[in-house]
Image: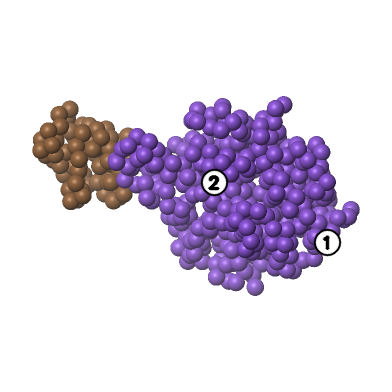
Chain colours: A brown, B purple
Amino acid sequence: MDTLDTLRGMIADKFEVEPTHILAEATLETLGLDSLAVFDLIFDIESVFEIKVANDEVKIVTVADVVSLIDRLRQEQGGS
Amino acid sequence: MQRVAVTGWGLVSPWGSDPVLFQQAVFNGRSAIQLLAKRPENPWPDRTAAWIDGFEPRAHFQFSQLSTLDRASQFALVSARAALQMSGLDLNRLDLEQCGVYVGTGMGSAGSLEATYSTFYGEGSRRLKPLTVPLVMSNSAAAHIAIETGFVGPNVTFSSACASSAVSIGEAARKIRYGEASVMLAGGTEALLYPGVVHAWEALRTLADTDPRDPAHSCKPFSKNRTGMVLGEGAAFFVLESWEYAENRGAVILAELKGSSSTSDSGHLTKPSIAGQVRAMQAALRDANLQPEQIGYINAHGTGTQANDSAEAAAIRAVFGMHEASPWVSSTKAVHGHLLGGASALEFLVTLLALKDCSVPPTANLEEIDPECEMNHVIGAPTMTPNLRYAMSNSFAFGGTSGVLIAAAVN
């Protein structure tokens, strides 16, 4: 699955953000996600992408940061 | 000392959020109580409850907001919004430092906590939702209301079981009386109809037997054949303002909150104390600067348990006497159930509606009055009380806390 597309769908559904605004360079903050919302998003990401995100990995700013984090962890943790 | 004006109210009830529909149902003794077995969750004890069908969180909140909004907080926010709207207050013109939020709740975010434990112990999962703590913390509803309104004054959650919201409303009024706030949003909320919680109540042997003829009639306050209480859920909130502030802005003043009391039995954990209830009612009368004979109606705590109703009736007789001029008394729990932390708030609304229309609601299902509960009961239908000027709302909690509110009609 395409990471950005999947992530875009997740953010759009959960946080009611217009999908066309969810660009790689967009920051999560400008999309309306505060620190608690980011924790909530990561929880869903862990389920959907079957990865485990450690506490020191959650400093993510842009959508692209999230995509690269997901891709790296899937590779490291052997997810599909 | 400032006088306290009530300028808005809002509610979430089994009959919805329209005060008119709520008033029609309660004052005509229409019960919202049903068999718990009709609900999808399991397992339920073979009992009844009064719950809210058709409350759609997504009609009020964004999907992402629901991660930190337990059902009790949802009820609180929806009713606080309605109260604010009714008051006509313009948030942009308020001195927000003079505005506060007081919330009463008995068991807080009981449903979310139960779901969390179900995940942890039931499913053996160690993956709990990341926002569980802010979701279940007892002051969650108060925090959400403050964030939404921008009220930066006092923000306190009161938890004293069945008296929680009498205390929150009474203390909020006190803030205004002493000039420490101009506007307070105060009320109570409860959403505890989850199998684990209800089974805990069942274990305490306090829940009413299901009426074999009609489950809706299972709660029978002051009746000889009463067998216990019926749990309910919902919320009610009020906008309280200093009289001066309300008058200056041309607000419609709906009632005056004359006085309140908050006392403790300091006796038994669950057994009601006649002396404690007498003390609470007398303290509220002193606070309101009223004599017992001035009270025309009492919305009783009236849970439908053997112990509460006979004790409360004895306490009311001790304070008000037992003669023709003694106040009318009714318990509306027979139709909306016992909302615990939300009970006093919803019943204070009933009390204010009675004052507004000079009509007092009946105690439903009161077919044979228990001789121990002799009072001037309102039976069968609402009673017109053209001279009704002052009314009292009683709440007597497990843990021994009593909360009594007294209001006055404005016209």
Find residue B235 and name its label.
none
Q: Please report the residue visible at 79 percent of the width from the left and 61 percent of the height from the top.
A: B319
Q: In the rendered view, does B367 fall on the left or right side of A52?
A: right
**Element class at badge 1:** helix
| Label 1 sits on residue | B293
Subunit of label 1: B
Amino acid type, label 1: Glu
Graded by Cα atoms within 10 Å as few (under 14), some (14 to 19) or many (20 or more), the crowding at tag 1 reads few
* CA distance separating discs 2 and 1: 34 Å
B88 or B325: nearer the viewer = B325
Which one is earlier in the sequence, the residue at label 2 or at label 1? Answer: 2
Left/right placement of residue A69 relative to residue B58 reads left
Question: Nearest the camera: B164 or B22?
Answer: B164
Residue B45 visible to the viewer: yes
Q: Quadrant of the N terminus of chain B?
A: bottom right
Pinpoint residue B219: horizontal percent, then vertical percent. 69, 38
Frontmost residue, B411 versus A54: A54
- In the rendered image, the quadrant that contains the C terminus of chain B is bottom right
In the rendered image, residues at marks 2 and 1 fall on the same chain: yes
| Residue B161 placement (x, y as % from top left) | 57, 53
Tag 2–tag 1 contact (CB < 8 Å): no
In the image, what residue occupies the spot 29% across and 41% down? B126
**Quadrant housing residue B389:** bottom right
Q: Which mark is residue B190?
A: 2
Pointer 2 chain = B
Furthest-right residue in this view: B324
Tell me the element at label 2.
strand
Residue drawn at point x = 69 percent, y = 61 percent: B276
Q: Is residue B371 left or right of residue B83?
A: right
Q: Who's the residue at 69% across and 58% down the image?
A: B273
Residue B17 lies, in percent from the top left, at: 59, 41
Q: Amino acid at mark 2?
A: Glu
